[in-house]
Image (tube, rainbow, N blue to C red):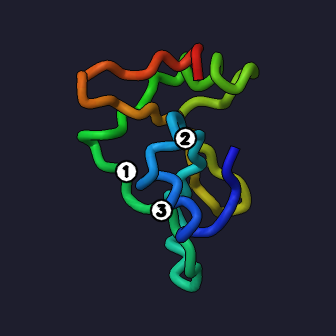
Amino acid sequence: MLIGGASLFREALAQDVVHSIVLTRILEPAYDDCDAFLPDLDPATWTRASHLELCEHVCFKVEPGVIEEQGVKYQHELWARTYRSGIIMHIDTI
């Protein structure tokens, strides 16, 4: 598990040591004063998993879709690395 700033995420993604990402994507507000972000995920390398796969991966029911709390809109996502062979790593083996 990695928890850290943008440079740590960028380095881990570049070294191919991360096989899945559980992401909370903030949709609104923009938070223009934030200074650290996860780098954009390359669609040639990363595939968004289904909501069911997300729930199975974290072993609990995750609220689907966009959630709004105290004026903040967000959603939970699971991303899996796609390898050059075109095989997507099976979520249950991550």
Q: Amino acid at mark 3?
A: Arg
| 25 or 71, nearer to the observer | 25
CA gap, disc 1 to disc 3? 10 Å
Q: Amino acid at mark 1?
A: Leu
Tell me whether the residue at label 3 lies in contact with that at label 2, contact meaning CB atoms closer than 8 angstroms.
no
Lateral position of residue 3 relative to residue 91, left or right: right
Q: Residues within 10 Å of mark 1 (few under 14, many from 20)?
A: few
- Quick one: label 2 or label 1, which is nearer the N terminus? 2
Query: Which is nearer the N-term, disc 3 or disc 2?
Result: 3
Under circle 3, the secondary element is helix
Instruction: Point out the residue furthest to the bottom here.
Output: 33
Q: Position of residue 43 (x, y in %)?
A: 27, 42
Query: 90 or 12: which is nearer to us?
Result: 12
Q: Are marks 2 and 1 in contact (CB under 8 Å)?
A: yes
Which residue is at 58% across, 30% downward? 64
Nearer mark to the viewer, of 3 and 2: 3
Is 48 placed above or below 28 here?
A: above
Q: Position of residue 31 (x, y in %)?
A: 56, 76
Q: Quadrant of residue 36?
A: bottom right
* Residue bearing mark 3: 10
Q: Which mark is residue 41?
A: 1
